Image (cartoon, rainbow, N blue to C red):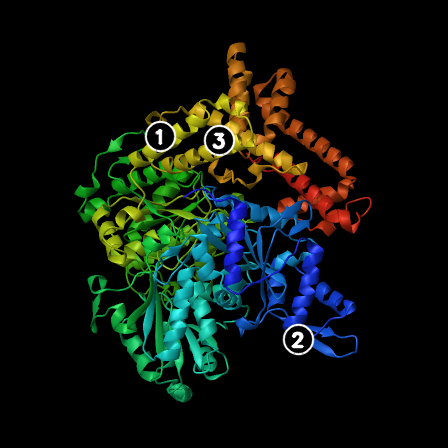
């Protein structure tokens, strides 16, 4: 197939859209956009607006950011007409979407910081709600994504901010087409292919337009399947499998009274699907109430927060059974509770209060129904509510092969919930890049501190006394200490260590603590367990027992072991309190619950922009069963396993590591100190198919090394040496180099996650790789500079994936150590050492900006320092002087009050919150005009960020 130009793609798409029912309209600039909006809103609202009235509408539409405009779109505006009457202006009809007016136009030009021209725009009632960006076939689709990000920054805010009403973006190169919600902090990882009900992706632009962009479907998507997330102030759009599952549930409730379940793999966003299904189902006239049921307190709390994030106050969480009974009998349409409290509510004590509900149609939605009680509780609930309908969600269903036997026999998910309405298994999610594959290493020999090995093959370890032996556990601790940095990108990610018993958890923690006190590592370790039972559990469960009562915090009633484990846990919590200035304890149920939540928070919130890694980071949490299911944290990328796992427990535990987060996190790391190879293969086969093992797990080290060799060969065809980068003729040639080296870095990122990694295995030396990286970063700096002088470049839309450029141990302390060595070297050694230091700085993204100043310190200050021990003090003095000079220069260039601007910088460093432009303008001698304000504000904030990046970030030794 020959490559179509962007113009051909555009024209063909517009013709197709006209055939689907869109009206063509010619809009070339912002004025025409406003004029068309007036006529369309008048037609849609069946009225006319005077100039003054329409100005009021425009002023209303101009308020707020993208998130707030999404709510404005779905609301009405009370307009006072010139005759004094009130008129409610509608902008979008969510109830009957076919009554909206659909138009298509192309090549609208808007001028903000820069002049941008957009490809194809879909207008609904005159508002631009869908923006389509096209690239010729053969071009990486990521470039269209980056172009959208640029448009948002440069021009969407101009002309009354009408383009900030865009709800969806579509990006396509003809053969690959994806959609995404309009969010500021979006990632290419939040772009999705559309698919059919059987999860077959629809990638071609023509097929995508027919299935997704036809007015009937698009109207429904905007009306019902975009979720306004109140916590993060962003829009979220459902992925195709979430859409089809929700539609299937709606159909089941409308047309049947049978129970059913949804099988969507762990990590695929079941909470969002279940919320959207609950929200739509509760508004159906035949439904009296929707009850969302979870089976543990921690998920009750987590799910409540997530539901309320999607719609504020949508869930009034039940603190006790009495509160639940009240909600079941009042006008609350959506109730969130635990299965344990629901069981109490239908017990003899409360039966009379609920009698009126017995014959009402109540929809019970069970979160993670594979963990729901498959026995008496389930029977009691279904018998009491005789018109109830049960919908289950699970990532790992119970089949005959993995069912546990109880007094009711072996009960499967199908036995309890009936037919499966929609499937989306782990292979589907990996294919769509919605979850990551697993990189599994089975560790059979354990390295000790002197780099010798204890020769114990995993296959031969089958005796409990060997598994529990302190000698073996200590060797594993040494192994984890040796490789944790490598697995977690120098502690940028966290890990879980799951062990077989509480006694083993205690042994592991004690060894880590002893070695920390001996100065052998600086890892931050925590543990949490319940100190009653002490047994090897084959299945991963995640619970805090007692369900709000926290029996674990009661005085020990039984054995010495229970007392001993509680005392140990109390001392470990003491270490935690010291690390993080907490006051948690096992002696108070609420404080013990808060301890669990604080551990969860430290793992979950690491992904947030304002999370302080230096003070709040938690590296490893040791668990027996807790946190292995239902717990999601994108910044967890590693699971150390020293326990037997199988079937759904194994998949659930492994899946703690495989949430998508940027390019750096390329897989979930599993380091197994047990021989789980067969159990892993069996579990993957059970929950997908027998051919799925190669899809779910990443290849062996040797295979990745082969891929690296192929990428290296392709790079050298473009630039045989790193010096060749200087000779590239134009930006197109430079773009080819960037893409080739980026592919090499991606493979290197995976390679370095293996404990077997060795530069000796590769056909490039480490120094040459670093030299190529320096040239790559030079091009990145060039693009940054071009942007600052308002010069457009084809490299603008290329993602340099800077998160792949990381260093294990480089920081200011490391550089100062090298400077001390430089001071003591002879002339020839000093010359080589100086080059090595500058090369090191040039290849590290965090320290690169500091290279020029450090070079100045080496050349101008180092010759005058006589005492090596004074280098650190002299460097600090030099750095502060340079910082004062740079701040003075910045303030002089931009006419800023130095004291006020420094206060603004200090506030930014402390909070991580970018200042708003009004705060910047308060530091100026004269406030700029409205026309200049945006450009000047953006420029000053950009300079402020560069100042902080240069003088503050990475400067903590």
Residue marked by disc 3:
737
Say whether marks 1 and 3 touch (CB < 8 Å): no
Residue marked by disc 2:
46
Q: Is residue 437 above or below residue 344?
A: above
Q: How much space separates mark 2 and mark 1, taking CA atoms?
A: 65 Å
Which callout, 2 or 1, points to the residue nearer the camera? 2
Q: Residue at x 48, y 33 (%)?
A: 736
Q: Is residue 222 left or right of residue 656?
A: right
Residue 454 lies in what quarter of the image?
Answer: top left
Q: Is residue 462 left or right of residue 96?
A: left
Which callout, 1 or 3, points to the residue nearer the camera? 3
Q: Position of residue 62 (x, y in %)?
A: 69, 61
Q: Is residue 879 above or below residue 32?
A: above
Q: How much space separates mark 2 and mark 3, taking CA atoms?
A: 56 Å
Q: Is residue 319 visible?
A: no
Q: Residues within 10 Å of mark 3 (few under 14, many from 20)?
A: many
Q: In terms of secondary structure, where does tag 3 sit?
A: helix
Q: Position of residue 644 (x, y in %)?
A: 24, 52
Residue marked by disc 1:
709
Q: Residues within 10 Å of mark 1 (few under 14, many from 20)?
A: some
N-term-proximal mark, 2 vs 3: 2
Which of 100 and 916 lies nearest the eye of the viewer? Answer: 100
N-term-proximal mark, 1 vs 3: 1
Q: Is residue 155 left or right of residue 839?
A: right
Q: In terms of secondary structure, where does tag 2 sit?
A: loop
Which of 275 and 319 lies nearest the eye of the viewer? Answer: 275
Quadrant in which the N terminus is drawn: top left
């Amino acid at each position: 197939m020959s490559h179509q130009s962007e113009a051909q793609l555009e024209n063909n798409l517009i013709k197709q859209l006209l055939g689907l029912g869109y009206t063509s309209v010619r809009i070339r600039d912002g004025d025409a956009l406003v004029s068309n909006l007036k006529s369309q809103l008048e037609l849609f609202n069946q009225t006319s607006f005077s100039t003054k009235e329409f100005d009021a509408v425009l002023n209303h539409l101009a308020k707020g950011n993208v998130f707030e405009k999404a709510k404005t779109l779905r609301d009405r505006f009370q307009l006072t007409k010139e005759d004094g009457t009130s008129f409610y202006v509608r902008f979008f009809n969510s109830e009957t979407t076919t009554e909206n007016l659909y138009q298509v136009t192309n090549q609208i030009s808007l001028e903000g910081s820069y002049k941008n021209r957009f490809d194809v725009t879909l207008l609904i009632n005159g508002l631009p709600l869908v923006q389509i960006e096209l690239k010729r076939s053969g071009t990486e689709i990521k470039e269209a994504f980056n172009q959208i990000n640029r448009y948002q920054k440069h021009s969407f805010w101009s002309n009354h901010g009408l383009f900030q009403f865009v709800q969806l973006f579509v990006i396509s190169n003809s053969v690959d087409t994806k959609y995404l919600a309009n969010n500021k902090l979006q990632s290419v990882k939040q772009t999705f292919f559309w698919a059919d009900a059987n999860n077959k992706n629809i990638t071609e632009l023509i097929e995508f337009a027919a299935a997704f962009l036809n007015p009937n479907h698009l109207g429904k998507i905007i009306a019902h399947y975009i979720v306004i997330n109140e916590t993060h102030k962003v829009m979220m759009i459902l992925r195709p499998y979430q859409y089809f599952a929700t539609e299937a549930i709606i159909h089941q409730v409308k047309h049947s009274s049978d129970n059913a379940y949804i099988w969507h793999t762990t990590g695929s966003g079941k909470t969002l699907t279940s919320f959207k299904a609950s929200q739509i189902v509760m508004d159906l006239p035949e439904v009296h109430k929707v009850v969302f049921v979870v089976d543990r307190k921690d998920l009750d709390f987590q799910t409540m927060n997530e539901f309320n994030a999607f719609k504020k106050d949508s869930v009034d969480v039940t603190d006790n059974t009495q509160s639940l009974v009240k909600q079941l009998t009042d006008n609350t349409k959506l109730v969130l509770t635990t299965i344990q409290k629901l069981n109490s509510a239908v017990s003899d004590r409360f039966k009379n209060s609920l009698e009126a509900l017995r014959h009402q149609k109540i929809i019970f939605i069970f979160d993670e129904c594979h963990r729901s009680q498959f026995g008496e509780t389930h029977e009691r609930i279904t018998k009491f509510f005789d018109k109830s309908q049960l919908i289950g969600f699970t990532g790992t269903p119970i089949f005959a092969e993995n069912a546990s036997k109880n007094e009711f026999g072996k009960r499967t998910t199908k036995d309890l919930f009936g037919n499966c309405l929609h499937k989306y298994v782990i292979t589907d999610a990996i294919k769509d890049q919605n979850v990551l594959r697993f990189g599994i290493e089975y560790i059979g020999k354990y390295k000790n501190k002197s780099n010798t090995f204890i020769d114990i093959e995993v296959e031969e370890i089958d005796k409990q006394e060997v598994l529990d032996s302190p000698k073996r556990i200590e060797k594993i601790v040494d192994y984890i200490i040796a490789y944790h940095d490598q697995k977690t990108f120098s502690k940028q990610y966290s890990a879980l260590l799951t062990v077989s018993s509480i006694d083993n958890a205690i042994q592991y923690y004690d060894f880590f603590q002893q070695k920390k006190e001996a100065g052998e590592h600086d890892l931050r370790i925590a543990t949490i367990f319940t100190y009653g039972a002490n047994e090897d559990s084959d299945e991963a469960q995640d619970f805090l027992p007692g369900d709000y009562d926290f029996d674990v915090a009661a005085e020990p009633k039984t054995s010495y072991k229970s007392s001993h484990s509680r005392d140990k846990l109390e001392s470990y919590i003491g270490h935690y309190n010291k690390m993080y200035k907490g006051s948690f304890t096992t002696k108070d149920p609420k404080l013990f619950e808060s301890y669990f939540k604080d551990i969860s928070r430290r793992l979950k919130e690491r992904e947030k922009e304002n999370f302080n890694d230096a003070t709040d980071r938690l590296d490893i949490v040791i668990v027996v069963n807790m946190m292995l299911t239902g717990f999601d944290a994108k910044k967890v990328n590693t699971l150390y396993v020293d326990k037997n796992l199988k079937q759904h427990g194994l998949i659930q535990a492994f899946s703690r590591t495989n949430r998508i987060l940027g390019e750096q996190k390329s897989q979930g790391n599993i380091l197994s100190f047990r021989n789980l190879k067969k159990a892993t293969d069996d579990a993957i086969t059970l929950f997908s198919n027998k051919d799925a093992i190669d899809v779910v797990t990443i290849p062996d080290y040797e295979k990745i090394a082969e891929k690296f060799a192929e990428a290296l060969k392709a790079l050298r065809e473009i630039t045989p040496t790193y010096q060749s980068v200087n000779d590239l003729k134009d930006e197109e040639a430079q773009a080819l180099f960037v893409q080739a080296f980026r592919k090499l870095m991606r493979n290197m990122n995976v390679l370095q996650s293996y404990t077997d990694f060795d530069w000796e295995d590769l056909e490039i030396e480490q120094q040459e790789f670093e030299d190529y990286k320096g040239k790559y970063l030079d091009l990145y700096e060039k693009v940054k500079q071009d942007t600052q002088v308002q010069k457009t470049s084809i490299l603008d839309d290329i993602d340099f994936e800077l998160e792949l450029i990381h260093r294990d141990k480089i920081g200011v302390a490391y550089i100062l150590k090298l400077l001390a060595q430089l001071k003591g070297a002879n002339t020839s050694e000093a010359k080589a050492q100086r080059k090595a230091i500058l090369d090191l700085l040039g290849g590290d993204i965090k320290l690169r900006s500091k290279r020029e100043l450090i070079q100045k310190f080496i050349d101008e200050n180092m010759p005058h320092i006589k005492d090596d021990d004074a280098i650190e003090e002299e460097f600090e003095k030099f750095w502060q002087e340079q910082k004062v000079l740079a701040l003075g220069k910045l303030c002089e260039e931009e006419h800023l009050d130095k004291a006020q601007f420094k206060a603004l910088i200090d506030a930014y460093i402390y909070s991580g919150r970018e200042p708003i432009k009004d705060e910047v303008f308060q530091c100026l001698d004269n406030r700029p005009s409205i026309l200049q304000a945006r450009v000047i504000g953006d420029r000053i904030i950009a300079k402020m960020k560069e100042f902080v990046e240069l003088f503050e970030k990475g400067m903590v030794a």
